Amino acid sequence: QVQLVESGGGLVQPGGSLRLSCAASGSEFSRYVMGWYRQAPEKQRELVAAIYVGGKTDYADSVKGRFTIFRDSAKNTVYLQMNSLKPEDTGVYSCNAVTPSLRASWGQGTQVTVSS
């Protein structure tokens, strides 16, 4: 199973920026599909952004133009750059990895709070 460790969450004012990191174990990182999910209080978990083998990316409509997902295969790390943050971006952000054999793993999550 892939081990995932997230970091970079915190408290930020509306309009601010944060960068989340997710470090993954394993020797096949470049072949994993990586995603960032978030869960706001009393809401279901939703996919925020995903990056596929080859570099294609997908974003939730609510974050398009503000968030960017990218990966550094030399560091086995996927990032989520979040700009122009809004209070509705508040939630627990979790990293997800899906291996070529379709096994999924989750990180422990990191809290992002957008508030003045």
Image (cartoon, rainbow, N blue to C red):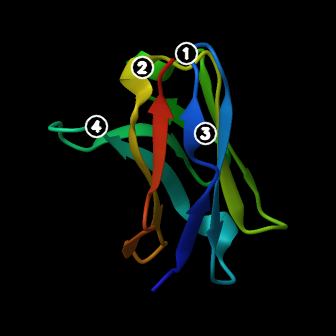
In the image, taking residue 37 as reference, residue 27 lies left or right, namely: right
Amino acid on which disc 2 is placed: Pro
Q: Which residue is mark 1?
A: 14
Amino acid on which disc 3 is placed: Lys
At label 4, counting other C-alpha atoms closer than 10 Å, the crowd grade (few under 14, some 14-19, many 20 or more) is some
* Place of residue 67 in the rendered image (x, y in percent of width and height, measured from the top left): 59, 27
* Place of residue 84 in the rendered image (x, y in percent of width and height, measured from the top left): 61, 15
Could you tell which of marks 1 and 3 lies nearer the N-terminus? 1
**Which one is in front in this view, the residue at disc 1 or the one at disc 3?**
1
Nearer the observer, 46 or 42:
42
The tally of labels here is 4
Q: Which residue is mark 3?
A: 56
Q: Which residue is mark 4?
A: 40
At label 2, counting other C-alpha atoms closer than 10 Å, the crowd grade (few under 14, some 14-19, many 20 or more) is some
Q: CA distance from mark 2 to mark 4?
A: 11 Å
In the image, taking residue 10 as reference, residue 112 lies left or right, namely: left
Which mark identifies residue 87? Answer: 2
Could you tell which of marks 2 and 3 lies nearer the N-terminus? 3
Q: Are marks 4 and 3 in contact (CB under 8 Å)?
A: no
Under circle 2, the secondary element is: helix
